[in-house]
Amino acid sequence: MKVSTVETTLTHAILVLAALIAVYPLVSIVASALQGADGFGLGSFAVAWERGSFGPALLSSAFISITVVLVTVAVVSLAGYALATMRVPGGRIMLPVLLLGLVLPYEVTVLPLYQMMTDWGILDTWWALILPQIGLSVPLGVFWMRAFFAAVPVELLEAARIDGAGRFETFRLVLLPIAGPAIATLSTILFLFTWNEFLLALVLVPQSPVAQTAPLALSFFAGAGRSIDQSVVAAAAVIVAAPIVLAYVILQRRLIAGLTEGAVK
Amino acid sequence: MTVSSATRATVVATPRGRRRRSSFTAYSWSSLLYVAPALLFFGVFVIYPICISVQTSFYEYDGLTVATPVGAANYVAVFTDPALREALLHSLVLLFFYAVLPVVIGLGLAGLLSRIRIYGLTFFRAVLFIPQVLSSVVVAVAWRGILASDGPLNSVMQAVGLGSFATSWLGDFDTALPAVGGIGTWVQYGLCMVLFLGGIVGIDRSLYEAARLDGAGAIREFRAITLPALRPQISIALILCITFALRNFDIIWNTTRGGPGTSTAVPSVYIYQDAFQNRALGQASAMAVVLTLLILVIVGIVQFALRERSDVPRAARRSGGVR
């Protein structure tokens, strides 16, 4: 294609600018965390780690997110498989209802959930966050896995059937082994959502330092008052962001490819 | 574990011949076993709470004593109480910053990028997507620093001679709402760009060649090729941005808490405060239901509008679009 080098250069300059703006806030907290009260160094990180109890918070976030991802992937794979390959009674009603679940604001579920978790005696525990977040992840997961299983060639299912495989054997031995990439992308997205969820954590684990997630701990820490050195707050933000940013650097290719293709489907 | 072994037992118990015939054609009741675990989680932790919210919205309830039925009074309050009406209005303003602006910026850049061969596309996509990955609390902390009265934004403004406009962006009644909006624009524009870039890569390059042979300029090219081709991506970007804009509790709670005064108060902040600070659960529930309906209606309109046009023949679409 014939487009002038001037235009190519200018457009890339704009793209670079857009990318710089996208990373600047992250760079700014790293920079201000490193410039602590006693000069350049890691001092602010030590203070934030000690005062904000981010160790247990990161552990909570990791346990909650991993559990939600594992259980969700298990239940939505089964459901997606059934909805893609079998005639499920009521299937036509299930899909629109699940579709509503995709755009639902958590605000409408969170007050009754608070009441439920109180009644069940699990408020302020990991389970108060795990159980609802599995439920809230179901719509996305079912659509994702259903789209994947629906795209599998019918011949493959036929072949498995002719070989005498039952429905569950077909699922376990034929479909699951090829679903790896789809499941990996879905897991990444669900992990991000669960790790970053804030409102549910604020409402469902408000009092317990043990069950607090990393974003919630950061919110309390940063809101605790003006007395805290801003570089310590920035260091706390870096501590909370670091695991996710690291995971993102490793998984970004799969995540973005999955999102750009999957979102439109 | 229990579920999958139960499923297997049922499948094995079904007579072989019948299973073959019914597998993929007739209704299979055993398929419900596959769907059941997912539906159970969805039903108990999503559908049931929604029903409770709807029920509570017709009562006056403090969460402790007996609830009093009040009919539609809580809903009337949503639309007549000046504070709640103001919050809904703020939501519409934020819709511009969180949805319209990111999509427009994303489309503008996509239009420019569609004309050239992009170097380092995967790298740029990965970087542009970073705001989506960060926890909203981290985003809020970072922007609080940037927008602070002694923050980098004001330093830059002073350096370029706009020092007289420098202010505490999140603390000033006049600037707090657009400042919070700006954070939302920052969070969402990368997502829009990544989605649109994904769409552009899929456009047949020969369409552009042909358009250029016909003497089409950049604007014509954008309108005739890029824009129609990106329709599915625009639709999904708008839906994601609109839901984000109308939910929007995290960023506001962690930057301004709805302040100063009520200048950045949005429905979700009142829902939280009414429920957990003022113990007005009925009012909070009514607000949550209204917010949900608002999101469903707007998302429905967007989907309808963007799907409808793609059914119109291409030529008609183009002549209609010139206006």
Image: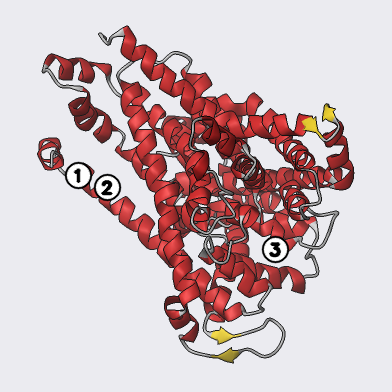
| Label 3 CA crowd tier, 10 Å (few <14, some 14–19, many 20+) | some
Residue at point 19%, 30% (across, down): B224
- Residue A163, given in percent of the width and then of the height, sits at 54, 31
Residue under label 3: A203
A16 shown above or below A234: above
- Residue B19, given in percent of the width and then of the height, sits at 51, 48
**Callouts 3 and 1 on one subunit:** no
Q: Relative to the observer, which residue lies in front, B270 or B1?
A: B270
For the residues labelled 2 and 1, say whether their Cβ atoms are less than 8 Å apart.
yes
Q: Is residue B310 visible?
A: yes
Residue under label 2: B307
For the residues labelled 2 and 3, say whether their Cβ atoms are less than 8 Å apart.
no
Mark 3 residue element: helix
Query: Which amino acid type corresponds to the residue marked 1 in the rendered image?
Result: Asp
Residue under label 1: B311
| Label 2 CA crowd tier, 10 Å (few <14, some 14–19, many 20+) | some
Chain that bears disc 2: B
Chain that bears disc 1: B
Q: Is residue A170 visible?
A: no
**Callouts 2 and 1 on one subunit:** yes
What's the distance in space between the residues labelled 2 and 3, CA to CA?
A: 38 Å
Residue at point 71%, 45% (across, down): A65
